[in-house]
Amino acid sequence: GLSYPSSPLHAPPRPPLPSMRRHSGGNFAGHAPEDGGGALGSAWSVSSADRPDDGQADNPEAEEDRFFRKLPTRTCVRLSRPKSLTAIVDRLSRDLQDLSIHHAGLDGKSVQVVVQSLRGKAHLCKLSLAFNRLGDYGAEALAPLLEKDGCKLMYLNLARNHITPEGCTALAKSLAKNRSLKHLDLAENLCGDEGITAIADVGVSAGWRELVLSKNRMGRAGIAGAARLVRESTSLRSLSLYLNGIDVQGGIMLSDALMMNRSLTHLDVGANPLGSHGVYSLATMLSRNTTLESLDLRGCEITYTIPQRSTGGHSVMTRYGKGTILGFKGKNMMKVKLNYGIGYMHPSNAYWTAEIKETLKKQPNDMGFFKLCEEISKPTCSLRTLLLSFNHLGDAEIQRLCESVIKAGMLKRLGLTNCNISTKGILYITRLLRRSKSLTRLDLGLNTIDKKSARALGQSLRENKTLTSIDLVQCRLSAGINSIINMLPNNQTLRTISLGGNLLVEDHFLLLSTKLRDNYSIEDLGQLMCRCPKCKNRLVSRWLLPEAVTRGGAETKGNEFKDCLAQILGRNKLMNRRGRKIMFLLGLKSERLGSASPLHNILGSSEILERNILRKIFEFWD
């Protein structure tokens, strides 16, 4: 299941049972260690997989009880497919702060047991019940937890729980009485227009900072409700409307709302049929909005004119007889008037005339994209992240985009994954890398990069001094991979270069390990895989490399460079961590945090921290 592991300062020893899995690396605090070696600890998750077959597997309560006796008091628990949910919930700590229960089959009745147990947890601030079957009854059952006095819940995740408009309405009534929630995730539900409108009405005054409404079959009324939330909310920082069927009219609604918004910093409208005209309206908004920093337009067909689904009056022949098209419902259903009444059917059941086919045909149109580039090039544009992946971009579009990014000098991340970029387009991007002084992350995955393009890309990376991450996954780098590898000794700023999914053989790994000896910044190479017949497509994971490759029972020199590669990446990670720590400590002007410190504005004038405490804070952050 999904998990959000924590990064401990002092991790307790691993329990002897294989079903208790410790997660390392992440963002959230865990429990206090038993030896009292620090205020932060590890997060532990209980899973029904890999249970020990010791004769007690048939008694889940005794087994779970033995797990809990082995562990100290926990403040962070993650459960995935547990066998006995009741036994676990009854033993949760009173100091519980973070609870995640995924893929547990929770329904409306079983969630009542969880809610009843959590009502006594005064410190609970994060609850995730994603990938269950709560439904409307389960959403209504959360009311006692959300409405109780002194509720400190700040994060609620109910993604993929089959919640319909009735459940959203009941949930909205409970959320209206809650003043602590900051993050709400309702992705992949069946909220519909009525449910989205109810949630948006509450969110206007609720003080939420993040709202996820992806994949909710949103109609025109739902988009209007989301636009009203954006227009009137003064606290919302992030809004995700991914894959909701937002068309040109929906883009215009959001654009008008964003012109009046002064709080939103991240907007995700990916996988929506905005088309060129919808992107044009959003680009116009950028000239008046000064707070939006991240815009996600992945898969929005931004270089095409999306036809309007309003072909009323056209007659078609259906399998049920001749009818008249009244309009379209969403993307896949059309409203047809037949002799016996009005109904909906799939377009595949109709014989289209030439006139209708021409009306519904997408036409190339880059007007919206050029308007977007024009707004990006202005020094007043606040965008720092622009994701244009999964859109068809020609050479003219790539050239205009690169020129705008160079002129503005403000964009930090640019996503161009699977944009069908040609060799000429890659050459424009190499010019961007040589001249840009702000770009730190570039995604070029799933684009074909031939030998000529790879050579130019490698030369530009030699000269670039700002890029820290580049994605080259599945770019068909075979002959040109050597040009990318040869630049590593000359670039000491790149920390991540993803080369997974490319045709790498043993010679490439040998060259990679040789060049990385003189590089002290690369920490991650992605999920590499050796394609030579002797390695049998063995995966080189991000942290552990495959076992020794043998030829006829004897180890070869291939083991040496693989072990060396792992050691080099570990060395660079440690050195980068130490360097960041030194820069952090050098920022302190005195033994105590005074008014001249860069953290003074964050912590406030009344907060005075000693330097050793700041060291512990930095170790946890890192």
Image (cartoon, rainbow, N blue to C red):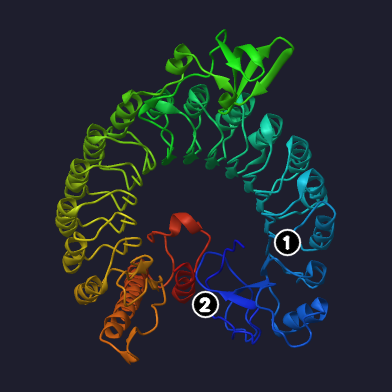
Report the residue that reaches farthest toward the top: 313
Quadrant of the rendered structure where residue 504 is?
bottom left
Quadrant of the rendered structure where residue 367 is?
top left
Q: Is residue 56 left or right of residue 561?
A: right
- Say which of marks 1 and 2 sits in front: 1
Inspect this view and state whether residue 120 appears. Answer: yes
Q: Residue at x 39, y 59 (%)?
A: 598
Give the residue type that dot 2 points to: Leu
Q: Work out whether 592 lies above or below 255.
A: below
Q: Is residue 182 left or right of residue 86?
A: left
Q: Residue at x 69, y 79 (%)?
A: 51
Give the residue type that dot 1 points to: Ala
The x, y position of residue 60, in whole percent, is 80, 76
Counting residues from the start of the chain, the first of labels 1 and 2 encountered is 2
Q: Quadrant of the N terminus?
A: bottom right
Q: Quadrant of the C terminus?
A: bottom left
Q: Residue at x 62, y 84 (%)?
A: 36
Report the residue that reaches farthest toward the bottom: 554
Inspect this view and state whether residue 288 appears. Answer: no
Q: Secondary structure at mark 2?
A: loop
The x, y position of residue 457, in whole percent, is 19, 53
Residue indicated by mark 1: 104
Q: CA distance from mark 1 to mark 2?
A: 30 Å
Q: Residue at x 53, y 40 (%)?
A: 242
Residue 9: give its label: 2
